Image (cartoon, grey):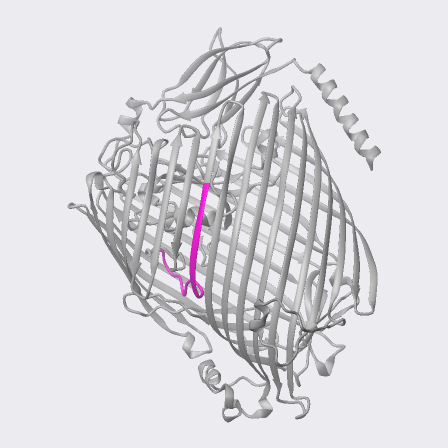
Amino acid sequence: MKKVLLGLLLMVGVTISAFAQSSGSRGTVTGTVLDEGDKSPVIQATVQLLSVKDSSMVVGNVTNLDGHFSLSVRPGKYLLKVSYIGYTPFFKQVALTRNNPRLNVGKVELASDAIMLAEAVVVAEAPEVTAVADTLVYNSSAYRVPEGSALEELVKKLPGAEVDEDGKITINGKEIKKIMIDGKEFFADDPNIAMKNLPVNIIDKVRAYDKQSDLARVTGIDDGEEETVLDLSVKPGMNKGWFGNADVAAGTEDRYSGKVMLNRFIGENQFTVIGSMNNVNDNGYPGGGGGFRWGGQNGLTSIKMGGFNFSTQSEKLETGGSVNYNYKDADIISKQASETFVSSATSSFKNAQNANRNKTTSLTADFRIEWKPDTMTTVIFRPRLTYGKNDNRSATNSFTFSQEPEYTTDEILSAADNLSSLIPEENIVNTIARNSLQKGDNFNVGGSAMVNRRLGKPGRNITFRGSYNYTNSSSEQFSVSETDYYQKTEEERLEILNRYISTPTLNYNYGARFTYSEPIFKGGFLQFSYYFQYKRSKSDNSTYTMPNDWEIAQGYGGDNVGVLDEKNSKSAQYTYYNHQADVSLRWIREKMSLNAGVSFQPQKSKLSYKKDQLDTVAVRNVFNFTPTFDFRYKFSKTSQLRINYRGRSSQPSMTDLLPIEDTTDPLNIRRGNPGLKPAFTNSFMAFYNTFDTEKQRGIMTHFRFENVLNSISNRSTYDPQTGGTVTMPENINGNWNLFGILGSNTALRNKKYTINTFTMARYNNIVSYMSDAQAENVSDKNKTRQLSLSERLRGTYRNDWWEFSLNGSLAYTHSRNSFKEENNMDTYQFSYGASTNVRLPWNMSIATDISQNSRRGYADASMNRDELIWNAQLSQDFLKGNAATVSIQFYDILRNQSNISRVISAAMRSDTEYNAIYSYCMVHFIYRLNLFGGKGAGPRMGGPGRGPGFGPGPGHGPRRF
């Protein structure tokens, strides 16, 4: 291995030397185009090098999402021209020589064209959304939200955006991975920090786009490793000093909330401190006219967090990073009624109540350093450290039946001590009472480093990337359980299990990648890459049987008085070697780009495993072949088509391949399957968008198809006497899904009226195995076909002081199950309502929304219900410059909201209801600090769409469209 690495390093050195000597036939002119006012990057600006003699264009290009540009040209004298609609063109003479073939003109700041802008003045609001190629730009001032709202409430109103109850953000079907501010990462690994804490009133625009990886950005050659981000720009003038917010609130039902944020933005440098605490599940202002949303956050959660984020930039060095502390205490109580499909003729029914108290603490620190010692070399280093611990307690009471009960879940739970008075004993399979305590901690340190060297000719690069990751974790689990098997004999009927399980784990992960890119024709590049990865992990699982009189509370004391359960204790050491060779072709034209490649991956895995009498070593050698294809065509600056295909292979876990049986949980026994095959997933995606900037009309559509070959499912053997299952992983074919969305945004009547529509269709073909104890060698293949259609429609009128919206949504689900026709569903969920936000002359504002949410088509009559949800807020600004606000917020005034969900798959259906507090009232006090100057800045911090605020508002001067 050492000889191989030495050979590679020697080859790299010779290559660098050879190309360095052969360079010089062409030069490059680079730079960054910025808005002179707010210093934000100007995207898709036209950059040209003109002939000095006749002003004819020699070469041209457009700026990227960061405002950067690069032009390749022979040495000589030229006239640099930078232009964009709404700005005064910029001209500068430049010269390249053979001795100095590379020129960086630095920052080119474009000034607003006052004459052109004067012609564009309209008595209307700013447009809701504009588009530049695959970048959607939303104007914050076009979306009114209640006073004091955080970013989450703005994002919920963006066309095509969704925020689920877990905080997952999607824009037009793509999950948002990062939040950025003015192109710089903001608490990079946790978008929820920005969503819950950044106040809307500091945000000017929201850009949604696919951000390239560090490698693609530095080399200029797309590697397909992009991620969808939201990039926020702060309002003009705010990048020149200190600004911040403080928000404290108290309410009925013992609700409280507090937030503080302080920012220091000076040019390219940013520094932010954030702190918050609340016990309102971070749900902000519920409803908000955003359309149908049944249910909400699960349980009652209190959160305390604090952290800071920074970013600095100089000519050669950029640094950034964040440190974040988070404490979460979740009190979750749920009631569940479920049906598991055992065979075509049999089902198992369960009613359960779970009470969980989960406390987690985490500390995360990640940093980024980018150094450019010269114009040809880039070094990027990303270190990261995390520490976390958890303390989780749970209590469960569950009841399993062979026939579906005629009684409700509440009636069954309340009759737990005398269950046979409701249900015949021959229909009761088991009852379980279980209490558990789980404690653990986790320490992780890692990082990645990348060194890129451009080798003279544009597109010719050599890159090294290395990564390291170390994790040390441990967990302790204490549990006491009592199971009553109604169908067993009296002597075998009661089973008591008291256990203590300790699991320390160590993980190491190393990786190194060498990449070389070579231009082969005009606009064409070949990229070669070799990647080596080594992983090693070691874990020891020690299981102890505790005395019957042992109490779970003793787990906190750490005294182990149990007997080692050798049958269920195990240790494993896993090593993994991966060699990956990639070849890809990148072809770029003015309107078209194509990226096609293939990856070859020989892999070796080794598992040393000890359990009871088994002491074995398993070795697996696998060769994976993965193709990729990405095609993009730009019809115009605001219209493009993208088609993407990617294939990927996934391996079963090594323990699933061992012929072993895990009986730690007698009701959920798991066996290995040495015959498992790798699964292969085919993913096809097509995306098209177009936007008419003059008429403010846009259409977006997104289509995706995915199928899985040799998908790893589970074959379950059900024991009707105990209600337990023996599960073994098994390959299965037939899992595939289709997904499509169509969205449109239309402005009417001088942009005062807007109509947004969002249509979604999804089809899932889900298959799984099932079998019962009487047919152990026969497995039925159950199939569930599920079609989901939904439509959301919103119409809005807005002017300087008033916004009024009508919204409606309809969701239809058509499910067909090949085993149990009685579980076929045709369900409807629909909602309609209105919202308004009024800014009154005496610095008062009123916001309210009301919606009727309905559900139909469920077999359980209690699921078919109507909920009329009404929320309201009254706010009053005061102090100089409206620096302070007092608001009173009313949530679920009519006390109708519930939290019920249904999940159906090929294996089961489940209805669950969670605890929550929806109906309460809170009083907020908000204070805004602003100590900055500059054009466009002022002492007031008004909300979106308000006259008072940063920069020109409606009726306060021209806006650039």
Q: Is residue 298 magenta?
A: yes
The quarter of the picture where the N terminus appears is: top right
Q: In screen coordinates, is 91 left or right of 920? A: right
How many circles with numbers are drawn on the protein? 0
Q: Is residue 675 visible?
A: no
Q: Is residue 501 above or below residue 108?
A: below
Q: Residue 628's spot in the image, x, y percent?
A: 66, 43
Q: Residue 109's spot in the image, x, y percent?
A: 40, 22
Q: Residue furthest top?
A: 53
Residue under the point 42% across and 79% down: 861
Q: Is residue 402 magenta?
A: no
Residue under the point 83% across and 64% down: 615
Q: Residue 253's spot in the image, x, y percent?
A: 32, 66
Q: In which image quadrant can residue 572 be found?
A: bottom right
The residue nearer to you, when weighing 880 against 806, is 880
Q: In which image quadrant can residue 553 be found?
A: bottom right
Q: Residue furthest left?
A: 842
The residue nearer to you, when weighing 900 against 585, is 900
Q: Is residue 769 visible?
A: yes
Q: In screen coordinates, is 619 left or right of 569? A: right
The quarter of the picture where the C terminus appears is: top left
Q: Which residues are magenta?
A: 290-308
Q: Residue 474's spot in the image, x, y percent?
A: 64, 58
Residue under the point 38% across and 60% down: 280
The residue nearer to you, when weighing 674 against 560, is 560
